[in-house]
Image (cartoon, rainbow, N blue to C red):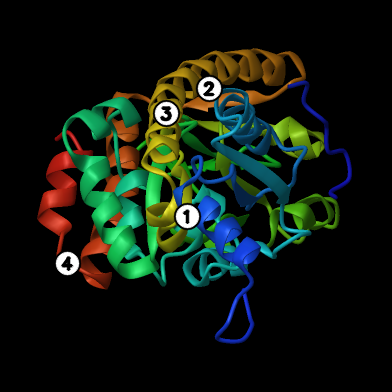
């Protein structure tokens, strides 16, 4: 676990002839009460102590409280249980039953998850307008996964730096040559800004910052303090762009094998949790913003023209990448997930 990580409080085999009691026992199994309680083995792409995994565990708790006797989720761990980069494939093949994490972590399987990163509308609206249904159908076909929910949505991303950046000729920021750590989805955006994209696992970022291996990072507006990265990062660039793409997926074979009542319960809890976690994320983002400022974080807010150009570059890089990878559903996804 990374230095400084905070914990958040919240067959049957036999011959052709059977004894009569065995036949009776089998008949009781076939015609008796409903199937036994189902258990879904779940993993998170983040460490357990990170705020995002803690939110997922809140969903797990709600399902387990309401699903006694019907369905339970057993959380078996984060990257220490199944490495982050292997979790999507583990879900696809049924090694695990459920995963939680960013869609941008498995673009090789489902490039269309870029629609979540490139979205500027809430998860609730994505569900109402059919966006989540379309994304689910794509996941089912490409990944053998049922897309259960887009939780913890609405959290924007920022560039955090160790030192104040220079100014560009158009009034924006000058990031030319700066080494910025971030997940895969930032690559095109950072390149467009002249920065160097560096891919380092989150638990190793603290060391990279302390040794000067990177000049800054891309990260959501929540979670910087979880890893104590604020010891080194002293500047944040506003406005935030895009939003978190954290999803909960269930292996499709496992999903279809569940009792219909179990599926209904999971859907019901998940849909409600999309809205609940969204509201909680907004409040937490505001709280962490205040705390970071109190700790000395310098927030550089771009003026209107520079901010518009900055955001246009961010969203354009995401949607162009999706179109270049697989344009089959590009127009439909853009219409459902992005408001011009």
Residue under label 4, please give it.
Answer: 327
Residue under label 3, please give it.
Answer: 154
Is residue 177 among what the camera can see? Answer: no
Q: Which quadrant: the C terminus?
A: top left
Asked if disc 2 and disc 4 are in contact, CB closer than 8 Å, the reply is: no
Q: Tell us which disc is closer to us: 3 or 1.
A: 1
- Residue 281: mark: 2
Q: Earlier in the sequence, mark 4 or mark 3?
A: 3
Q: Earlier in the sequence, mark 1 or mark 4?
A: 1
Q: Is residue 3 left or right of residue 322?
A: right
- Counting the numbered discs, the total is 4
Q: Residue at x 68, y 32 (%)?
A: 54
The residue carrying pointer 4 sits among few (fewer than 14), some (14 to 19) or many (20 or more) residues within 10 Å by Cα, namely: some
Q: Tell us which disc is closer to us: 1 or 4.
A: 1
Judging depth in this view, the residue of 157 and 73 nearest the camera is 73
Asked if disc 2 and disc 3 are in contact, CB closer than 8 Å, the reply is: yes
The residue carrying pointer 3 sits among few (fewer than 14), some (14 to 19) or many (20 or more) residues within 10 Å by Cα, namely: many
Residue under label 1, please give it.
Answer: 30
Outermost residue toward the front in this view: 20
Calculate the distance from the C-alpha at mark 4 to the C-alpha at mark 3.
25 Å
Secondary element at tag 2: helix
Q: Residue at x 12, y 43 (%)?
A: 335
């Amino acid at each position: 676990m990374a230095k400084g990580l905070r914990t958040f409080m919240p067959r049957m085999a036999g011959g052709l002839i059977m004894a009569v009691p065995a036949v009776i026992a089998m008949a009781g199994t076939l015609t008796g009460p409903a199937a036994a309680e189902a258990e879904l083995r779940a993993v998170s792409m983040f460490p357990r102590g990170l705020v995002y995994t803690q939110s997922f565990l809140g969903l797990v708790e709600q399902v387990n409280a309401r699903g006694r006797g019907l369905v339970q989720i057993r959380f078996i761990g984060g990257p220490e249980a199944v490495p982050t980069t292997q979790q999507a494939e583990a879900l696809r093949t049924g090694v695990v039953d459920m995963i939680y994490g960013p869609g941008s972590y498995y673009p090789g399987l489902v490039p269309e998850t870029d629609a979540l990163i490139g979205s500027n509308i809430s998860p609730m609206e994505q569900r109402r307008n059919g966006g989540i249904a379309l994304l689910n159908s794509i996941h089912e076909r490409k990944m053998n996964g049922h897309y259960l929910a887009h939780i913890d949505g609405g959290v924007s991303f920022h560039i955090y730096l160790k030192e104040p950046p220079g100014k560009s000729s158009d009034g924006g920021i000058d990031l030319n040559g700066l080494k910025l750590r971030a997940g895969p989805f930032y690559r095109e955006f950072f390149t467009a800004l002249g920065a160097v994209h560096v891919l380092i696992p989150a638990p190793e970022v603290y060391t990279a910052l302390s040794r000067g291996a990177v000049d800054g990072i891309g990260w959501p507006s929540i979670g910087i303090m979880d890893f104590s990265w604020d010891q080194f990062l002293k500047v944040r660039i506003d406005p935030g762009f895009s939003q978190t793409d954290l999803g909960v997926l269930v292996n499709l074979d496992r999903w279809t094998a569940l009792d219909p009542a179990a599926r209904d319960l999971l859907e019901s809890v998940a849909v409600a949790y999309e809205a609940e976690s969204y509201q909680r994320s907004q409040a937490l983002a505001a709280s962490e913003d205040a705390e970071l400022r109190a700790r000395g974080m310098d927030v550089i807010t771009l003026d209107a023209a520079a901010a518009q150009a900055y955001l246009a570059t961010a969203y354009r890089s995401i949607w162009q990448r999706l179109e270049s990878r697989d344009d089959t559903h590009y127009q439909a996804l853009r219409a459902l997930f992005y408001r011009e």
